[in-house]
Image (cartoon, grey):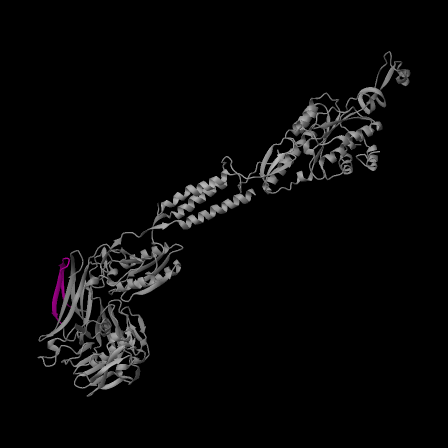
Amino acid sequence: MPEMLLEPRALRVLESLRWNPRQVHAGRIRGERLTRRSGLSIDFRDYRDYVEGDDLRHLDWNVFARLDHPIVKTYQDEEDLAVHILVDCSPSMDFGSPNKHALAKQIAFAAGMIGMLGGDAVIGHVLGRRLPPPPPMRGRAGVLSWDRWCQAIAPNGHEILGQSLARFVSGTHRVGLVILITDGLDPGFAELLRKISARGHELFVLHVLAPQEVEPDLEGDLRLVDSESEATVEITASQSAINEYKANLKAHCELAAYTVQHYGGRYARVTSEQSVEEIVREIWQREAWVR
Amino acid sequence: MTFQDPRMFLWALPIGGLIVLMYLMRMRRRDLKVSATFLWPERQDEIRANHFFQKLKFNWLLVLQLLALALLLGGLARWQVRQTGLTGGTTVVVIDASASMGATDVQPSRFEEARKRLGSLVDGMQGGDRLAVIEAGPIPRVIAPLSNDSAKVKSALSGLGQTDAEADVGEALRLATALVGQAEGAKIILLSDGVFDPIENFSPGKSELLYEQIGKEGKNLAVTAMGTTDDPKGRQLFVGVKNTGGTELPATITISADKKAIFSVQTSLKPGASWGRTVRVPAGAEWLTGEIKSRDQLAADNSMTIPANPGKSMRVLLISRGNIFLERALALDSRVTLDRAAVVPEGEKRGSNGASKYDLVVFDGLTEVPVKARSILTFGAAGTPSPVTKEGRLSKPTFLDANAHPLLAGVDFGSVYVESGEKVAPRGSGQVIAEAKEGPLVVVSEGAQRQVYVAFNPVDSDFPLSIGFPIFVANVLEFLGGTDAASTLAVRTGQVLSIPAPSETPLPVTLPDGKVQEVPATAGRYVIRAFTVPGQYKWGSGDSQKFVQANLRSERESAITPVSTVEVSGNQVAANQKLDRFADLWKPLALFVLAILALEWWVYARRS
C-alpha cells in the first residue's frame, strides 16, 4: 500500500474533526449537516396543521387529544456539505524551502479528509491548470481516491492564479465551503476572494508563503523574473527596497484577510516551515475552523 | 565676478559628456526567478554601469555630479570676485608714522585714519592671508610679524604710534622686502601721505608695492628756522616761518623768551611764502620760543624752542670719498656740525691765513695733510703730520692688546676683522693704545694738536658694522673735543643722542609729558632714542642735569600736502584709491563640491 500524504497518527486526529462553517449551505443528498429545510432528522423544527399525506408518525397525539385538531411536528433536514478544496498549482507555488506546494498538498489532503469523514462532499480543484474537477468524494471510501488526487497534483500549471480563480468564480459549482490553499501572489487576489464570497461560498483561506518570501534574502543588482507572467523587475536589493517589498506584502495579505473576514470567511497566513499538524492544532482547532 | 582662466570650462564637454555617458549605460543585472514580482518596487540605483545603452533617466546623482563638475571647473577657471581689503596671500603693511601723518585734514588725523584702514584690512583677513605690519618711523620697526592670526595682528596694532619726526620710509620698505620680497605674489601696502623723500635703493623683489594715499589737503604754517648769532650789540635771534601748504593762512606769530613774549605780529602768508624776523635776545634768557597760532592742520611744527646759549659746539670737517657709517656716527653727537669735502680746503691747510673754522678734521682713507684744526682723526692713511711712521702694509692683522685708554672704552678690537691696513711705528709723542701682532692699530698723540691715528680704513674692515664703531667715534669726539657740553641742547625730533654712561645704571629720561623712560647703558654709553615728539626732555640732577629741547625742524615734514604719486627707485608709484582684489573663489567652491559629494554619498547611502 503506497504511503499516504499524512501519517496515520495525524489521520486519527482528523477523524474526529468536522468543518465548522458559519453559514448553512444547501445539500444534495442526505448528510450529517442540518439544513433550513424540514426533513427527517431528530432535531425539532416547528408545528403545523396536518395535511393529507403527512406521515402519521409525526402527528402529535397529545396535542390532538387536547385540542381535537391534528397537528404534526416537523424536523430539520440533514444534508451533505459541498467542500471545494482549491489547491494552487501555479508555478509560484513551486518555491521556497520547504516547498510551498508540498505543504499545500498535505493541507489539501487533511482538509479533504476532514470533509469526507464528516460526510461532506469533497471536490478538489487545481488552480493553475484547466483540469475538470474530480467527482465529489465522500466517506471513508473516498479517502484513497482523495489521497491519489492530492499526490498527483503538481505545481506545473501554466495559468496565473488570477485566471484560475476567475474561472472558478464563473463556474457553476455547488455553493458550499471553499477551502483555498494558495500563496495568493496575484495583484487581484483580494478582488477574486470577494467574488468567490459573493457567489455564496464560505471561504476558508490558507495563505501559504515561503520563509524566503516573508524575509527575502536578496543582495546585489538583480533582474527579478516573475515565475508566472515572466514579467521582470530590475532592483538593487538594498535594505530600503526590501523594506518596501515587506510593506507591500503586508498590505497585500492584510487586504486579503480583511476581504475574507468581511464576507464571513476565515483567513490564516502560514509559512511552508509549519507542519500540517501544527496548522490543524494551532489554527483550525484553536480558531474553530473545525469542531 | 570674473574667470581668470575661462578655457577650463572647455573641459565641461568631455568630462560632462563622460558623466552623462555613464548614466546612459545600464547595469547588467543577474536574473533571479521569484514567485511574483508585483510586490517588488522598481528600485534601480545605477551605481555601476557595464552595458550599453539605456534611455537617459532623471537621476539626482547625475544632477549632483554635474553640479559638482560645474563647481570644480569654476574653481579651476579661477572664478574670482572683486573684494576690498587685503590683496590676498602674503601682505606687509607699512604705515607711515612720520610727523606729517599727524595732520588733521582727515579726522582725527592721517595716522589714525591709516590705523583705521589697517584695522579694516586685519578684520578682512581670510584663512590663507598672512599679514605683517611695519611702522615707518625714524627707526622702522616690525609691529606684527607675518602671521595669519588676525587677532594676534590686531592686538599688536596697539603698539603703533605716530612720531613727530621724519620717517625713514625707504628703510621700512626695504625691511618689508626682506620679509616678503621672495614670496611670489606678495604685496607691500604703503599707507602714507607720500610726504617723504624719493626712495632710492629699493627693489620689491617678487612682491608688488601698492601705495594707498592718506590725506586730502595740506594747510600748514611752520616755524622753519630759529638761530642765534652774536654781534657787538648782543645776541640776536632769527625766527623764520613758512607757509608750506597750498592755501593762504593768517597767523599770529609770537616770539618769547622764557615764555615771556618779546615780539608778536599778525600776518597772512601765501602758499610758499616765508616770513622772517630778527629780534634781540633779552639778557639772561635761557629758552627762546617761536610760535604760530593759526588754523593749520599740523601742530607739531607750530612751535620751536632753542636754548638762548647754544653751548659748545664742534665743527667737524670730514675728508672722505663718502662713508655713511662715519657720517652717522659723527652725527650722533648733538654738538657736531659736520661738513664734508673730498680734499682739505686751502683755507684749512697749515700755513694759510686765518684761524681754522673746524675743531676736528677727519681723514677717512685719504692721506693726512697738515691742517690748522686743533684735532685730527685719521683712518688708514698716515701723512707727514701723523704721529706714526709708515713702514708698509698690514694684511689681516691679529689683535694683540689694548690699553685702558678712554678712547677704547666699550670698544673691542679683538672681534674686529681687518682686511688690510698700514704697518706703522709710533713717533714723537705718539702712544700706541691698541696693537696687533703685526703692528700698532691705534695711536694717539696729545701734543699741540690732539691726534688719533687708526691704522686701517673702516671700509677695509667690519668695524663699522660693530657696536664699537659709533662708541669709538663718540669716544674720539669726547677725547678730542672735550666733555664740557652745555646743559641745554636742541635736537631734531627723531634724532639719536649718544652720551657717555658713567655707570651701568639706566638713565631715567623725563619725557615732555612727564613720563620717565629708562635708557640702559650699552658699552659705556647711553643711546637716547626717545625724542619722538617736540618738547623738553631732561635727565640727571644738579650740575649734571641736562635739558634737551626736541623740535620738528623739517621742511619736508611740514610740507603736508598729500602726494598722489611717490617716487620709488626712479619709478612713479601712483596711489590706489581703493585696495581692491580679485579673490579666488576656489576655497568656497571646493567646500561646496565637498558638500555636494557628501550629499551625493548621503543620497546613495539612503537608497542603499
Residue B293 shows in this picture: no
| x and y percentages locating residue B211 in the rendered image | 27, 56
**Apparent side of residue B201 relative to residue B49 in the rendered image (left or right):** left
Residue B417, position in %: x, y?
Answer: 30, 77
In the image, is residue B422 part of the stretch drawn in magenta? no
Q: Give the image location of residue B241, x and y in percent.
A: 15, 63
Q: Is residue A170 left or right of residue A41?
A: left
Q: Main secondary structure of the magenta part?
A: strand
Q: Quadrant of residue B572?
A: bottom left
Residue B592 vertical position relative to residue B33 in the rendered view, above or below: below
Q: Can see residue A92?
A: yes
Q: Magenta segment, which residues?
A: B261-280
Query: Is B385 located above or below residue B43 in the figure?
Result: below
B341 over A218 or under it: above or below:
below
Decide which of B314, B486 is in the foreground and name it: B314
Task: Return the x and y of residue B83 as percentages of the image width and height.
Answer: 34, 50
Res A290 → quadrant: top right
> In which image quadrant can residue B200 be found?
bottom left
Magenta highlight on residue B278: yes
* Residue with the most extreme top position: A52
Near-viewer residue (B406 or B384): B384
